[in-house]
Image (cartoon, rainbow, N blue to C red):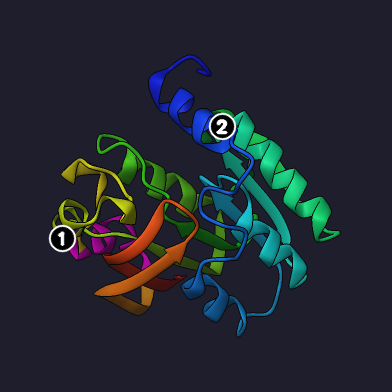
Amino acid sequence: MSNDPWTQRWNERYSQPEYAYGEEPNEFLKEKLGIISPGNALFPAEGEGRNGVFAAKLGWKVAAFDLSVEGMKKANKLAEKHAVSIDYQVGELQDLDYENESFDLIALIYAHFPAEIKSEIHQSLTKLLKKGGIVIFEAFSKKHLDYQTKNPAVGGPRDLGSLFSLEEIKNDFNDFEFLELEEKEIELSEGQFHTGSGSVIRFVGIKK
């Protein structure tokens, strides 16, 4: 797994001294976590740990995973800096040993997966969430390609299939009560690779 081009790309990005997307949490996640009582949280595609570490500082018991060993190293370093711990694993979801209905929260923050598996991953993740558990989601929408053309620094996948539509989210999380679901333009200032205007989908839902 560590030799495939996708993993190599992320290992290369995360092996730099600076944090690719900064050390501060995503603003949407920060806002939502501020009004939820802590429990067990899972952070898929967690990269360098900025969001998981923030949740741990609020009292969440945090599990996280990513394909990148370099991401894990940076995440553990950030956790140490803030005197918290996160349970970070390296691997693909199907190879990890998470138990069904064991999490109170799943945070999908720019967790872009290849087009052919992204719905399957969402549905697998849903099984890990307790009934009444919450998903917080922010990722680039299909309209984002236009923003990226004007400003490559805003980042995000360059293929339409890895980006999201409102319909895809409704289908992937069809057993959820939707508290929020919108597509909107936002200003990003997250490290070197998320800078400028972008089009995102934001979703908060409760598993029925």
Q: Mark 2: which secondary structure? A: loop
| Chief SS of the magenta region | helix
Whether residue 159 is situated above or below residue 122 in the rendered picture:
above
Q: Residues within 10 Å of mark 2 (few under 14, many from 20)?
A: many
One can see residue 182 in this view: yes
Q: Looking at the rendered structure, which numbered label has been put on residue 68?
A: 2
Tell me, yes or no, whether the two marked residues, 1 and 2, touch with CB atoms within 8 Å: no
Residue at mark 1: 143
Q: Residue at coordinates 39% horizontally, 49% vertically from top-left? A: 122
Is 25 inside the magenta-drawn segment? no
Whether residue 148 is situated above or below residue 57 in the rendered picture:
above
Whether residue 159 is situated above or below residue 207 in the rendered picture:
above
Question: Where is residue 45 drawn, in percent x and y?
Answer: 51, 45
Q: Mark 1: which secondary structure? A: loop
Residue range (magenta)? 166-176
* 120 to the left or right of 108: left
Q: Residues within 10 Å of mark 1 (few under 14, many from 20)?
A: some
One can see residue 101 in this view: no
* 132 to the left or right of 163: right
Q: Residue at coordinates 63% horizontally, 47% vertically from top-left? A: 64
Q: Residue at coordinates 59% horizontally, 76% vertically from top-left? A: 33
